[in-house]
Image (cartoon, rainbow, N blue to C red):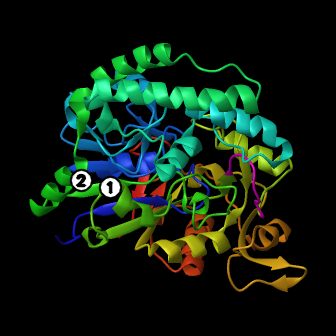
Amino acid sequence: MKGKGNTLIVGLTWGDEAKGKIVDLLAAEHDIVVRYNGGNNAGHTVAFGGQTYKLHLVPSGIFHKSTTCVIGGGVVVDPKVLLEEISRHEAVAPRLRQRLLVSSRAHAIWPWHRKIEELSEKHQGKGKIGTTLRGIGPAYADKANRVHAIRLGEFLRPEHLRKKVERIVENRNQAFVKLFGEPGLDAAAVWREYAAYGEAIRPMIADTTAYLLAALDKGQRILFEGAQGTLLDIDHGTYPYVTSSSASAAGAWPGSGVPARAIGEILGVVKAYTTRVGEGPFPTELKDALGDQIRQQGHEYGTTTGRPRRCGWLDTFAIRYSARLNGIDGIAITLLDVLGGLPELKICTGYTVDGKALAEFPDDPAALEQARPVLEDLDPWTEDVSGVRKFKDLPRAARAYVKRVEEIIGAPVRLISVGPDREQTIRRR
C-alpha cells in the first residue's frame, strides 16, 4: 500500500484558492477522485470548452468519463443538494450516477440543521461566525454528539430511519419554540421529502472505505480533494472563524478511510493574492480601491454564497505556516493573471504586534487581530499572461514573483494557473 501515484490537493489559505481547477486538471492522471471533508459550503469551479461548472458536493473529477468519484465519510451531505447537483451536470458528465459513490458513513444534513444555524447566527449578532447557513456546523456537531446524528447508510433502513427522524424533530422543535420562539418543523413532511431523496441516492451509497482500500491494493491512483483551506481547519485554523471539519491534509485519512502512508504527493494551492469570505482577522486585507480592483479583475465573489470576497496581498507568512503544517511537496499558484496591470505589487513576509516581529503564525485570535503585515515591494507587470503556457515566456516581473514565493515558502511551484480554463496552465517540474 505505497503512496506513489496518489496525490492530495489542499488549500493553504482561507479557501477559494481555485482547487477545483487543479483537481480537474490532475484527475486525468488518476483513477479515482475522493472528496474528504466539508459539505455544500464548499464551491469548486471547473472551466473548459468555453463553459464554467460550479460544484459543491460532487468531486471535481466528474468531467473525466473514466474517473470514479467518491464522497468520503468525512463529508456532510445534504441529499437534496447532491441530487440537484447530479441532475445539473449529467449532460456533461457521462454516466455520473454510475461513477459516483457516496460513503455510508457520511452524515446527512437535515432541515433542522439549517434552521439551527440560521437562528444561531441571527442571535449572535456581532459575534457571528459568518457561516454559509447551509447547516454544516450543526451537522458536524450532531456527528460528535452522536445522539441525533444520521448517517447516509441509515437511508438503507427506511422504517428505522422514519422513527428516528420523528424523535429528532420532536426534540428539535422544543428548542425552536421554547428557546427561539420560532415555529417547529412538520416531522411527517420532512420524512416524506427525505425518504424520496433516500430512494434516489440508494444505488450510490456504499462502503467507500472498503472500496478505496481495495483500489489501493490494485495499484489504482487516487486523487484526494480537500474543501475550504488550512486556515479554516477546525483545529489548526484561525479559530473560531473556521469551518467545522479538518480542512488541512490531516483530514484526508479519517475523511476518506485510507491510511496516511497511502498518500504520495501533497500539493498546496494558493492564489497569487489572498482572499477571505465572512468574518475573522485578515492582516493583508486591502480596504481601498486597490482591493476593489483585485476583486473586479479576479471576479472575487463566493461560488456558494455569491458574497464579495475580501481581497489583499499574498500572505506568505500564513502560507508558510500552512505549508509546514501540511508537509507539502509543491505549490500550485492560481489566478496569476489577475495581478497583471496593478499599479503596485506587494507580498506579506511577516507580522508585527505592538511593533515586535512574530517568529511564528499566531495561535491566539487576539494577536492575529492586532497583527500588522510586513510588506515587501515587488515589480508589477502590465502584460496579459493568460495566453502563456511556458514559465520562460512569463514577463520577468511575473517570474520573479513566483520565485520569491518559492523562496519564502520553501517549496517549488509546480503549477501556475493563468486563467480559469484547464488549458490555461503552466506546468513546471
Q: Residue at x 80, y 73 (%)?
A: 367
Give the image location of residue 181, x and y in percent: 77, 25
Q: Residue at x 41, y 14 (%)?
A: 192
- What amino acid type should be assigned to the residue bearing mark 1? Ser
Give the image location of residue 311, x and y in percent: 73, 51
Residues at circles 1 and 2 in contact by the CB criterion of under 8 Å? yes
* Viewport quadrant of the N terminus: bottom left
Evaluate whether residue 379 shows in this view: yes
Q: Neighbour class for label 1 at 10 Å: few (<14), some, many (≥20)?
A: many
Q: Which of the 4 quarters of the picture holds residue 76? A: top left
Q: How many labels does the image show?
A: 2
| Callout 1: SS | helix
Circle 1 is placed at which residue position?
256
Distance from Cα at disc 1 to Cα at disc 2 = 6 Å
User: Compared to 169, does 290 lie above or below?
Assistant: below
Evaluate whether residue 340 shows in this view: no
Give the image location of residue 142, x and y in percent: 51, 45
User: Compared to 251, does 372 lie above or below?
Assistant: below
Circle 2 is placed at which residue position?
209
Q: Which of marks 1 and 2 is nearer the N terminus?
A: 2
- Viewer-side residue, 196 vs 62: 196
Q: Which residue is drawn at 57% across and 42% down?
A: 138
Q: Is residue 77 shown left or right of residue 206? A: right
Check the image and name the residue furthest to the right.
354
- Viewer-side residue, 58 vs 425: 58
- What amino acid type should be assigned to the residue bearing mark 2? Thr
- Viewer-side residue, 371 vs 375: 371
| Callout 2: SS | helix
Residue 278 is one of the magenta-drawn residues: yes
User: Compared to 401, does 388 lie above or below?
Assistant: above
Q: The magenta stretch spans which residues?
A: 276-283
Residue 241 is one of the magenta-drawn residues: no
